Image: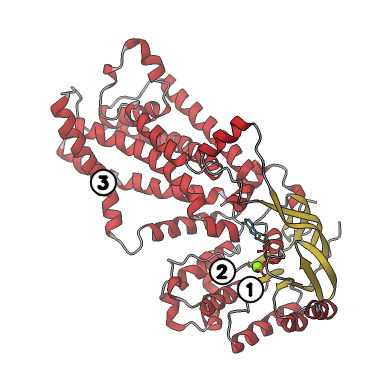
Amino acid sequence: MNQNLAIQAENLGIYFRMPSEPISGTKDLFVQAVKRKIKINQFWALRHVSFELKRGESIGIMGRNGAGKSTLLKVIARVLTPKEGRIIVRGNVFPMLELGAGFVPDLTGHENIYLYGNILGLTNAEVGKLYDEIVDFSELGDFIYAPLRSYSSGMVARLAFATATAVQPDLLLADEILSVGDAPFQEKCIHRMMHYLSHGTTIVFVSHSTDTVKKICSRGMWLEHGTVKMSGSAEEVADAYKAQ
Amino acid sequence: MKNTSTDPTPVYDSAALVSPFIDETKGLYSRWFILRRMIYTNFKTRYKRSYLGVIWSLLNPLLNMIVFVVVFSQLFRFQIPHYPLYILSGQMIFTFFASSTAEAMMQILYNATMIRRVYLPKTIYILAGIAINGINLILTFIPFLLIALIDKLEFSVQMFMIIPALLLLSCFVVGMSLIVATITPYLNDFSQIWGVLITLWTYLTPLFYPVDIIPEQSLALYKSNPMYIYVTLFRDPLLYQTIPELSLWINGIIYGVVFLLFGWWLFTKNSNEFAYRA
Ligand SMILES: Nc1ncnc2c1ncn2[C@@H]1O[C@H](COP(=O)(O)OP(=O)(O)OP(=O)(O)O)[C@@H](O)[C@H]1O
Ligand SMILES: [Mg+2]
């Protein structure tokens, strides 16, 4: 087993049950038990996906809406366990999956920093030490004491990024985190990611912006309908994806 | 495949997840501080800016007790010493059980956004829900003490036996909660069925009537009800300076351990599926 690999994905497959035939209640269960035929339509959101990522590498995942990018990140983050194949991930994973993942809208920004920090594996004392730095970076000011419900999406993204990147992670998973931030904040985020990258962090970066992918990532992967359509250098894949 | 001692980096290998029972236990142990955080989060969101909420949860059993006392002491005239406390202590135990399981069923649903987006040992959600009800149970000792003083309840050393009684009850409640929490994602209206079962269960447990009214021939069956056991283990030492017979303790231990182990096994076996279904 290669200790130098941050991620090993072998023939990954993930399927969801089709919403047309859920066993949603006792009535359904009864009916289906009587019919003696529980038909489950499987929708494969990911299938036959294999790749390896060395420590310190960065890969940009591209693809149309519904291609399976977020699903792939959830498999790496252990949210979804694979139905088929195998995933091996080495190192502390700091996931930023979707906007506001790991946050609770009713809690204040302050409380959410601790919650998200704990979820990332940091103790209260550790979060406490990083707290000022996080608030600084997020530029939220007094809003930090307001419930998250009252934040704009950009503000949520700032807080998520600031918290998840307060300490250098082994593996950073970023799912379209820059899409709602304004230009100066995007710059700041990219700068920080490049800094961590040069210090050994592995990054899996999902974005619809091919330019950002080219800027941050060395490798690229293009997903289509849950399978790998193309993989190679970020440059190659981003250009091919853009030219489609 | 497994984490070697020379390499401190954590390794997640989906193929190495062979024993969910143990993996979950280890995961929970290494992340106990998240449990504390989730308890706090639940508490905050439940009593969202309503400090009256806490007061209500204290007042509720008290008001319930008054209703029962008024109704039953007029209707049936049971000869039960310390009748208000009899009702209140039974209610404390049963409410802890009923609301913990009811809450456990909803936890996967309430935390669906969290479950679909971050990985945490799933037992955390269930345990956090139970802990809130446990805190509630402890808080209801305040109204209990108040009534105990008014009712001139005799304080005794036997009272300390409520501690092992509550521990055994907690094992049973955690086990039962994990079982119902596993069923709900697969069967959406199970919570309705459970509500009916709980009502039935209330009547099968000596909460407001004495055990003497149960006919002799069904007494053995009646006493096999785990909630009868836990209510008795709690109430007899608390109100009547008696320690229940050993066989009752043994039954309480068996129910507690068996349900806890079975619930933990069932829940962890299925918990990876929750992110797909939540
Ligand atoms: N919980 C779910 N239940 C059923 N189907 C799902 C679920 N989550 C994702 N899918 C399906 O899986 C497919 C891939 O979804 P995914 O979120 O990975 O796409 P994506 O590449 O991230 O798209 P986008 O660019 O819009 O973010 C989609 O067709 C989606 O409908
Ligand atoms: Mg997505």
C-alpha distance separating marks 2 and 3? 40 Å
C-alpha distance separating marks 3 and 1? 46 Å
Q: Residue B82, image x and y in percent?
A: 19, 30
Tell me the residue that label 3 is attached to: B60
Disc 2 sits on a residue from what chain?
A: A
**N-term-proximal mark, 1 vs 2:** 2
Question: In this view of the protein, which residue sits in the foreground, A230 or A96?
Answer: A230
Give the residue drawn at x 19%, y 40%.
B147
A184 versus A27 height, above or below: below
Amino acid, disc 3: Asn
**Horizontal relation, residue B215 to residue A118: left or right:** left
**Horizontal relation, residue B253 to residue B89: left or right:** right
The reply to whether the C-beta atoms of the residues labelled 1 and 2 are less than 8 Å apart is yes
Tell me the residue that label 1 is attached to: A167
Nearest to viewer (mark 2 / mark 3): 3
- Element marked by disc 1: loop
Tell me the residue that label 2 is attached to: A126
- Element marked by disc 3: helix
Mark 1 surroundings: few (<14), some (14-19) or many (≥20) residues within 10 A: some
Disc 3 sits on a residue from what chain?
A: B
Amino acid, disc 2: Glu
Amino acid, disc 1: Val
B42 versus B104 height, above or below: below
Q: Does the residue labelled 3 lie within 8 Å of ligand 1?
A: no
The reply to whether the C-beta atoms of the residues labelled 3 and 1 are less than 8 Å apart is no
Give the residue drawn at x 54%, y 59%.
B114
Disc 1 sits on a residue from what chain?
A: A
Tally the marks.
3
